[in-house]
Image (spheres, rainbow, N blue to C red):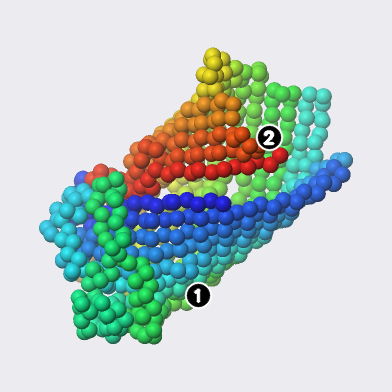
Amino acid sequence: MEKRNRSSNIMGANYELNSPQLGQKNEVDITGLTLTDITREKKRYGGTFVMDYRLPSGKIVFNNFISRGDTKAQNRAQTFDVPFSYHDYITKDLENKLNIMVNSLDYTQDLKWLKVNALLSHSFSGQESPKNLSFDFTENNAIDNFNRKLPPDSIPKYAKNNLDNTVLANIDKFDAISKDHIYTAALNLSRNFNITSTLASMIKFGGKYAYKKRSYDYNSSGGFLNYGSGQTARDAILDAFPWMKETVSNGSLNLPYPLFIDKNYNPDEFLKGKYPTWPGADIDLMYDVVHVLEGLGNTEAYHHRDMYSNLYDYSGKEYYKAGYIMADFRYKNIIRFITGARYEEVRRKYTAVQGNSTIGIPEFKYTYHDTTTDVVNHNLLPMFHLKIKPVDWFDMRLAYTNTLSRPDYVQIIPRQNIGVNSVTIKNYKLKPSHSENYDLYFSFHQRHVGLFTIGGFKKTIKDMIFPINGRVILHPELYGLTKKDKGKKLYTDENNTHPVKLWGIEVSWQTNFWYLPGVLKGLLLDANYTYVFSEAKYPRSILHREFDPTTFQYKEWVVDTTYTARMLYQPNDVVNVAFGYDYKGFSGRVSLLYQSDIFKAVNFWPELRQITDDYWRWDISIKQKLPWKHFQLYVNVRNISGTIDRDIVKGSGYPSAEQYYGKGIDIGLRYRFD
């Protein structure tokens, strides 16, 4: 049983360039700011049931795991649209229920000449969001003469914050349900051989088959209350809550925000006092208002939202087949060599919506059709591991491996929407990223020194997946689009055709000071440092436009080139240090995590590329055996340094995102069975 408070403060800022030109440093202007205060509570209940039946030279294990989680959150946000001078207040009530069930039957048998392991399993994951509601209140002409070169924390200082001129604009009520089933069967066979008295080997081979079935269904209702067509709805709300008529009367064009403000919502601070706090709406009143609107039937002010209720739905199946063979050779305790290969085939068959939101009124009638794609990927992944230990105090390890990073299934469903100014396409043709890895490590063991390891690694990553955010479409036929879509911005994901190269050095030291006198012998240290250098080429399409005096028209063409930057989501430096103390039934750790800046977002313009700020974080973990047999008390204190996660826009150095989860503490009681 687990209960956690995972509340947080989140800031997001958007930027653009002012009349950008290639080959010069362009000025970065801020366009928007969003501040979100999230009150979130997570509850989880889980249990495991295991049955073990022993056979002659074998056993059968029936394992069952079940978990149920319930997360409730209330989001109070305010957004500032600087160019259009809007200031919105948004209140959301959200709930997500997660159910997980895993059943597995594991059979192991030692025969005279063969060891057999077979596995059958089924896992189910179901998420349900039965109750989600959002109210949006808008203030027009809300920002006074703001200099867009200033940092985002300056925007609230220029806001008028006129709540009487802030009105109920948009209501959205939605629910969602997803289901995932995975059925797996695996068989592993192995046999040991003694080639000589000093050389032993083991041959192992096997296969695996998995069938996945998943679906997602999303439904939305809502509408706009600040339009003329919402008059009937506004009057119905006033009639249902007569006390509101003390402020506004029937026939009013708007319902002001003060009617809905929650007097009991009083946050202490936001992002450690960096931004001022703001009012939130009364969530109970929000549900009461929706109940009134639902009683009016399907109106322009509150109706079934056809586009959102269809666009996000999908279903799909995946078929996974894999086979492997490996050999393990040992020479005394000096040399161990493992080699083998795995072949796998993944077939993905997904159905999703492809629609056009420029036709008609998509809120009421969305023009779309279902599309099914069927894609198969094959991969052969060889590997070897070599360990040489010539003396007791030293060993060397060399490895060559191939690994895959598959795209998230949301990236590969055939969803598409053609908008007025942009086109969003999920790329069902995405291939897994394939990493070819070399690792070489040297370890030294000594009683007083402990374990000291130094090594290096090299990776070459092919088909790395990266986002395309706003590429201008000049050849719509390449994406299955029409000439009407020329000039729109494209949002999708692609595989990088240029391999990414990554090198690194890692040093670690693990020791305890057992040789110190008295209570000092309980001291210990675990430190790790990794330096990473990476180089990636990202596609860059430069649009050229030239006036043709013979035709009196502009000609446009694209020059495809690349730019070089670091690998996405990869830091240069990572440090992990844990200072510990063990004494009798007590165990304590104080740990430090440091990460240098991480390359977070690619962009055509260097000034709009994003990195993270350097990250320092301290945590504490304590365990204490209790005087009662098998009982242990544990305490975990997270982020005692109060570190804020921060992303930065390179052109200005201003933050594009900040997240603060506060300082957390977990207290628990553990019982260990014999």
In the orientation shown, which residue stands out farthest toward the front? 627
Can I make out residue 274 in this image? yes
Taking the spot 59% from the left edge, 42% from the top edge, the residue there is 670
Q: CA distance from mark 1 to mark 2?
A: 48 Å
Between 515 and 28, the one nearer to me in the picture: 515
Q: Position of residue 578 (x, y in %)?
A: 48, 30
Residue 539 drawn at (x, y percent): 38, 51
Q: Quadrant of residue 421?
A: bottom left
Q: SS at mark 1?
A: strand
**Looking at the image, which is closer to me, 91 or 495?**
91
Q: Which residue: 31% across, 61% down?
A: 264
Residue type (three-letter) at the residue carrying disc 1: Asp
Please state the horizontal and vertical placement of residue 280, each as a whole percent of the image: 30, 62
Q: Which of disc 2 and disc 1 is earlier in sequence?
A: 2
In this picture, residue 317 sits left or right of residue 492: right
Q: Work out whether residue 409 or residue 632 is closer to the camera in this orientation and state it.
A: 632
Above/below status of 30 relative to 215: above
Mark 1 and mark 2 in contact? Answer it, CB < 8 Å. no
Residue 527 visible, this angle: no
**Residue pointed to by mark 1:** 370
Q: Return the mark for residue 338.
A: 2
Badge 1 crowding class, 10 Å Cα cut-off, few under 14, some 14 to 19, many 20 or more, is: some
> Farthest residue toward the left?
145
At x 22%, y 72%, the residue is 256
Q: Amino acid at mark 2?
A: Ile
Q: Nearer the viewer, residue 435 or 292?
A: 292
**Whole-percent x and y of residue 152?**
23, 51
Query: Does 350 appear above or below 602?
Result: below
Q: Residues within 10 Å of mark 2 (few under 14, many from 20)?
A: some
Identity of the residue drawn at 62% across and 61% down: 124
Quarter residue 548 falls in: bottom left
Position of 86 compared to 426: left or right? left
